[in-house]
Amino acid sequence: MSERRDRPLSALRDVKRQQDSIIKDFDPSKSENFARQQQSLKDRHRAAFSLLSDTVRCESSPLEVLNMYAAKTKAVAKTEYIEAGSDKIFRCKISFSNLLLTIEGKGEGNTKKQSQHQAAASILIQMRERGRKEYGL
């Protein structure tokens, strides 16, 4: 295989070195857009807080509320694991994360669905407390 004349290996090595130095020197907190992104996320959380205020809905279908909250705040709600122990109790871990925060919730139940709901309810409670502290709501 021969080297292409329009892209010699030496030029590609120089580009690779330049890209590596850009990546190494990159710090998102120094970015001009970082402060705007953080403020935007805070505004989304404040606007979506009304979902968490509806405690009846949070208790009846916490997984649905968590997914709606994640969609409104452009976050990710991810089920890390669901496993059944030797005692036939299901254990679940769900994480909720975005640029501002990461919250984890764990739940146990007789069924997968119960364990997921308990984990989601745990996250919603943590977010409700955090929202009340931060936004005074």
Image: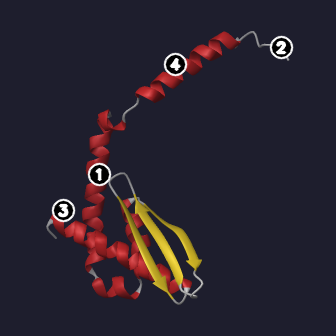
The quadrant of the image that shows the C terminus is bottom left
Measured Cα–Cα span from mark 3 to mark 2 = 62 Å
Q: Which numbered disc covers residue 134?
A: 3
What SS does tag 1 mark? helix
Residue 113 drawn at (x, y percent)? 52, 84
Q: Residue furthest right?
A: 1
The amino acid at mark 4 is Gln
Confirm or deny contact between disc 2 and disc 4 (CB under 8 A).
no
The amino acid at mark 3 is Glu
What SS does tag 2 mark? loop
Q: Which residue is mark 4?
A: 18
Q: Earlier along the polypeptide chain: callout 3 or callout 2?
A: 2
Q: Which residue is mark 2?
A: 2
The amino acid at mark 1 is Ser
Measured Cα–Cα span from mark 2 to mark 4 = 24 Å
Q: Name the quadrant containing residue 66.
A: bottom left
What SS does tag 4 mark? helix
Q: Earlier along the polypeptide chain: callout 1 or callout 2?
A: 2
The amino acid at mark 2 is Ser
Measured Cα–Cα span from mark 1 to mark 2 = 51 Å
